[in-house]
């Protein structure tokens, strides 16, 4: 029997439509950027849309053809924002590269993606000059600046000036419409083991993810918000905020390279920012700065924290001292990135604050569109009882099906469907709130029992003398592995090994308490601000536990 088809307009979901929407319906809403050049730049969505079209025109003039990759090495700023739309919107593929990766990794990624154009902030000129001989596919280098800051000397052949390129166009370009499943951008995973792998997003996946993330049970952002993404535009598209802001017509504030506590605080206040998003480590700096100066936030009301587990102590501080609501979020590059966020349900309203906090500290509920499950090592589904902990698998229209240029499928089968294995170990409770135990590689396996490194870190971070803490597995002759806690003390604070270990008493089972504490000046972080557990484990490879 023939189905009756819907009779609605066939309009492909296009990334360019986000910006044209903002230009038409929030045309005078501002985008403010702290520039690499040092000053503050402000213009509107109307200006941004015109310049993005001029960029699309300029890229076509350079000979770029649909599907070509245009890479960026850039901070959060309006020119990078224009590239998000000018590149993807014209059918090219934006490849945002994390400049904090090792140069060899950057070269590897750019070659894997076969980038044709590389746009970069002035900051990265020396890096790009060093990399250029290793980048045979790159035909055009574009420095994201104007004539007055254009480098007088450079080893780069035919270096182009971004402002010249944009200025040379007349802006008569019209955004094309094409298959919504066309690739829009590529982001590489950090690749802690083996080479990084590219997640290729489409126009469709990006728009669906954007619809999902503005919802009240997700980031809950609207036209009344002023959004400052601290999370870099090279870290999974700043978690979708550069798409979400034009979708709802919200003012955008870009911090450029100025990510220290003082600069962020001043920008948040000056531009009346109401909403922000970033990894826990950036909030450490901001909180410390605000506490030291006894400062408050006058407009900041909500922030999404994710990328690694947000310590409950940080959530409490932001809420009680600064009246900032923390929304704990979980996701990954392969998920565009958002999977879950923690917000309460109506039935939780009657709970006391402590019980509510316990829920909000979890990684949260899925956004409609994503589904999740946990499995045992044989791949069988585990119950949602809040206790059973297993391999977290996900599916959805903004979850990858395969990696760029790889033929093998990363997916696993469960109950007749295909799922992406996240590599995370998690429990899901009866109310469908997910809680990450660990990255599967980071769990501490003590005598056949698992100890969650995140749980140990969360407890340690609540100690007033602790700036940062990381729990890692240390080999043990009897138990195979035992936890070692690596701690950075707050400046001037005193804390002994015994005091630190004593702080765990009564908070977890005795056998889960770390065997030892190592105090260090600094904990290594990855290019996206996560604790580098692999490196820490190497650093403490020979560490002899007192219990061994
Ligand atoms: P990436 O693709 O580099 O963004 O890394 C994704 C990984 O970061 C996830 O698979 C998790 O292991 C970790 N992660 C992200 N958000 C959280 C969170 N809220 N709590 C714990 N781990 C997280």
Image (cartoon, grey):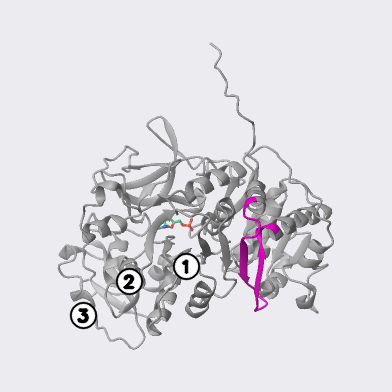
- Lower sequence index among marks 1 and 2: 2
| 95 lies left or right of 57 | left
Distance CA(mark 1)–CA(mark 2): 20 Å
Q: In which quarter of the image is ligand 1?
A: bottom left
Give the farthest residue toward the top.
1
Label 3 Cα crowd, 10 Å radius (few <14 / some 14-19 / many 20+): few
Distance CA(mark 2)–CA(mark 3): 22 Å
Q: Name the residue under label 3.
A: 499
Q: In the rendered structure, which segment of residues is drawn in magenta? A: 25-46
Which residue sits at x=63%, y=60%?
A: 108
| 188 lies left or right of 301 | right
- Magenta-drawn stretch contains 168: no
Q: In this view, does 281 lie above or below 522?
A: above
Label 2 Cα crowd, 10 Å radius (few <14 / some 14-19 / many 20+): some
Count numbered badges in the picture.
3
Q: Please tell me which residue lies in front, 495 or 209.
A: 209
Q: Kindly tell me whether mark 2's CB lies below 8 Å from ligand 1.
A: no
Local secondary structure at mark 3: helix
- Lower sequence index among marks 2 and 3: 2
Q: Is residue 474 visible?
A: no
Q: Kindly tell me whether mark 1's CB lies below 8 Å from ligand 1.
A: no
Q: Mark 2 points at which residue?
A: 317
Local secondary structure at mark 1: loop
Please report contact status of discs 3 and 1: CB closer than 8 Å, yes or no.
no
Which residue sits at x=67%, y=48%?
A: 16
- Magenta-drawn stretch contains 39: yes
Distance CA(mark 3)–CA(mark 1): 28 Å
Kindly indicate the quadrant of the structure image that contains residue 74.
bottom right
Q: Mark 1 points at which residue?
A: 529
- Closest to the camera, between mark 1 and mark 2, is 2
- Lower sequence index among marks 3 and 1: 3
Quadrant location of the C terminus in the rendered image: bottom left
């Amino acid at each position: 029997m023939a189905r009756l088809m819907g009779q609605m307009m066939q309009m492909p979901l296009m990334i360019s439509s986000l910006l044209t929407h903002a230009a038409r319906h929030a045309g005078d809403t501002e985008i403010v950027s702290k520039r690499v050049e040092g000053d503050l730049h402000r213009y509107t969505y109307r200006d941004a849309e015109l310049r993005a079209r001029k960029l699309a025109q300029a890229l076509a003039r350079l000979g770029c053809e649909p599907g070509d990759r245009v890479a960026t090495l850039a901070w959060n700023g309006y020119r990078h924002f224009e590239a998000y739309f000018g590149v993807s919107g014209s059918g090219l593929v934006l490849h945002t590269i994390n400049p904090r990766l090792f140069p060899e990794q950057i070269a590897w990624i750019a070659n894997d993606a076969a980038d044709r154009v590389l746009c970069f902030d002035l900051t990265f000129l020396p890096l790009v000059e060093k990399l250029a001989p290793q980048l045979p596919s790159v035909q055009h280098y574009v420095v994201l600046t104007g004539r007055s800051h254009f480098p007088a000397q450079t080893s780069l052949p035919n270096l182009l000036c971004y402002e010249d390129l944009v200025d040379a166009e007349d802006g008569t370009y019209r955004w094309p419409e094409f298959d919504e499943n066309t690739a829009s951008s590529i982001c590489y995973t950090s690749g802690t083991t083996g080479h990084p792998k590219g997640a290729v997003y489409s126009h469709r996946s990006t728009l669906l993810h954007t619809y999902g993330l503005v919802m009240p049970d997700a980031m809950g952002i609207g036209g009344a918000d002023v959004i400052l993404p601290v999370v870099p535009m090279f870290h999974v598209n700043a978690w979708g905020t550069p798409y979400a802001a034009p979708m709802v017509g919200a003012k955008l504030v870009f911090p450029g390279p100025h990510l220290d506590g003082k600069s962020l605080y001043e920008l948040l206040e000056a531009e009346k920012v109401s909403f922000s998003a970033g990894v826990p480590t950036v909030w450490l700096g901001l909180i410390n700065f605000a506490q030291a100066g006894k400062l408050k936030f006058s407009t900041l009301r909500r922030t999404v924290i994710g990328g690694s587990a947000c310590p409950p102590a940080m959530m409490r501080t932001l809420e009680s001292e600064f009246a900032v609501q923390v929304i704990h979020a979980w996701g990954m590059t392969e998920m565009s990135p958002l999977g879950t966020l923690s917000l309460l349900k109506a039935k939780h309203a009657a709970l006391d604050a402590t019980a509510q906090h316990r829920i909000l500290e979890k990684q949260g509920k899925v956004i409609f569109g994503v589904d999740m499950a946990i499995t045992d090592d044989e791949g069988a589904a585990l119950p949602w009882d809040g206790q059973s902990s297993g391999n977290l698998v996900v599916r959805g229209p903004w979850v990858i099906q395969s990696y760029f240029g790889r033929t093998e499928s990363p997916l696993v089968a469960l109950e007749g469907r295909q799922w992406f294995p996240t590599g995370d170990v998690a429990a899901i409770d009866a109310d469908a709130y997910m809680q990450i135990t660990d990255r599967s590689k980071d769990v501490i396996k003590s005598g056949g029992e698992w100890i969650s490194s995140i749980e140990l870190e969360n407890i340690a971070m609540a100690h007033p003398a602790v700036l940062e803490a990381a729990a890692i597995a240390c080999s043990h002759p009897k138990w195979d592995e035992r936890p070692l806690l690596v701690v950075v003390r707050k400046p001037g604070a005193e804390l002994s090994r015994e005091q630190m270990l004593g702080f765990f008493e009564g908070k977890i089972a005795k056998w889960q308490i770390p065997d030892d504490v190592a105090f260090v000046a600094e904990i290594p972080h990855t290019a996206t601000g996560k604790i580098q557990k692999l490196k820490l484990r190497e650093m403490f490879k020979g560490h002899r536990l007192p219990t061994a």
